[in-house]
Image: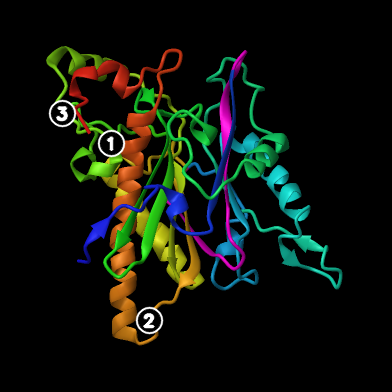
Amino acid sequence: MQPQRPGPANDLTDVRGLAVGHHQRHGRGWLTGTTVVVCPTGTTGGVDVRGSAPGTRETDLLDPSNLVPHVDAICLTGGSAYGLAAAHGVLGWLEARGRGFRVGADERAVVPIVPGAVIFDLSRGGVFANRPDASFGAAAAAAARTRPFAQGTVGAGTGAVAGGLKGGIGSASVVLGDGTTVAALVVCNAVGSPIDPRSGRPWGADRLLRADGPRIGRPRVAERAALRAAAAAPPALNTTIGVVATDLALDRAECRKLAAVGHDGLARAVRPAHALTDGDTLFGLATGTRPAPTERPERVRAINAVLTAAADVVERAIVRAVLSATGTGSWPSWRDLCPSAIGPT
């Protein structure tokens, strides 16, 4: 196994060229938002859907047997199926910049390729009709930057709940010994729990790196009781979605495998995962700025190292989502309930 260290930002933007932007509304009946990952030109994509209640857009385009070779952006959003409208705002924003699949002689005749996935957060702000629309997608795309971004109760994670606790957005990265970067961004919104009921610690706490934040100890007895009470009534409809990416040059089939192995990290960090009421969906992205070996033995070793790292960064991203979340309404955060377990960095 190659040695690993987190990238300088320890988030998805460590894969050079990827930009992340959030837009959300919180209050006055709102508790939802949208997160957009804008890709550099030539980014290859794949997808793997494991949950039984997915809400997705343009995932068939990512099949290796289909026509379109590259992805312009990924739209992750609240609002359940209604929230898919947010992607239309991303399309408009990209079209205005000439980004997309050329469909005519005029260089302005483009169709941006924007796959997307949604979480279920309807009514969590109090008003069922308050959900993301095209304006959310456009605003999130316009806010996208290739620098560290906010985590926790922001963007598509604004209305997220995980196992009865406040969920949110988390991200993590790793740089392998050969210089390859692998990173993930995950919206944790699960019917399963990210917390081990015996210890009261996040399932993936032992895999956190020093750069991920404070050390996580064992909560006190009263705190563990409060966690069990919060977990007793998790929301019935959920879905965890996200992106796992690398700068290694991968083809579309390999990007699909990248997304698939990312689900291993999800299953380690949330238990149970991929339930009937989850629509768990991960996208795999490869920017291709780092050439991959062409000879089979070396290529297999390089890709296997990336796949191993993909599961790890997804797991760490989910833990960081839980630790970064801010309690909202009737959903406390893990930090709210377990202050004694948060140690020094």
Residue indicated by mark 2: 293
Q: Which residues are magenta?
A: 27-52
Look at the magenta stretch and give its main secondary structure.
strand
Q: Is residue 17 above or below residue 238?
A: below
CA–CA distance in space, label 3 to label 2: 42 Å
Q: Amino acid at mark 2?
A: Pro
Left or right relative to 331: residue 95: right
CA–CA distance in space, label 1 to label 3: 12 Å
Residue lying at the far bottom in this picture: please name it. 295
Number of on-image labels? 3
Residue indicated by mark 1: 213
Which quadrant would residue 152 be assigned to in this image? top left
CA–CA distance in space, label 1 to label 2: 34 Å
Q: Residue 217: which numbered mark, if any?
A: 3
Of mark 1 and mark 2, the one earlier in the sequence is 1
Which quadrant would residue 165 be assigned to in this image? top left
**Image color mode:** rainbow
For the C terminus, the image quarter is top left
Q: Amino acid at mark 1?
A: Gly
Residue 11 in magenta stretch: no
Q: Residue 244: which numbered mark, if any?
A: none
Q: Are marks 3 and 2 in contact (CB under 8 Å)?
A: no
Q: Amino acid at mark 3?
A: Gly
Local crowd at mark 1 within 10 Å, few (<14), some, or many (≥20)?
some
Left or right relative to 194: residue 66: right
Q: Is residue 144 above or below residue 221?
A: below
Q: Give how far across and how far down residue 283 sits, in percent.
A: 48, 55
Q: Tell us which disc is closer to us: 1 or 2.
A: 1
Residue 42 in magenta stretch: yes
Q: Is residue 15 above or below residue 200?
A: below
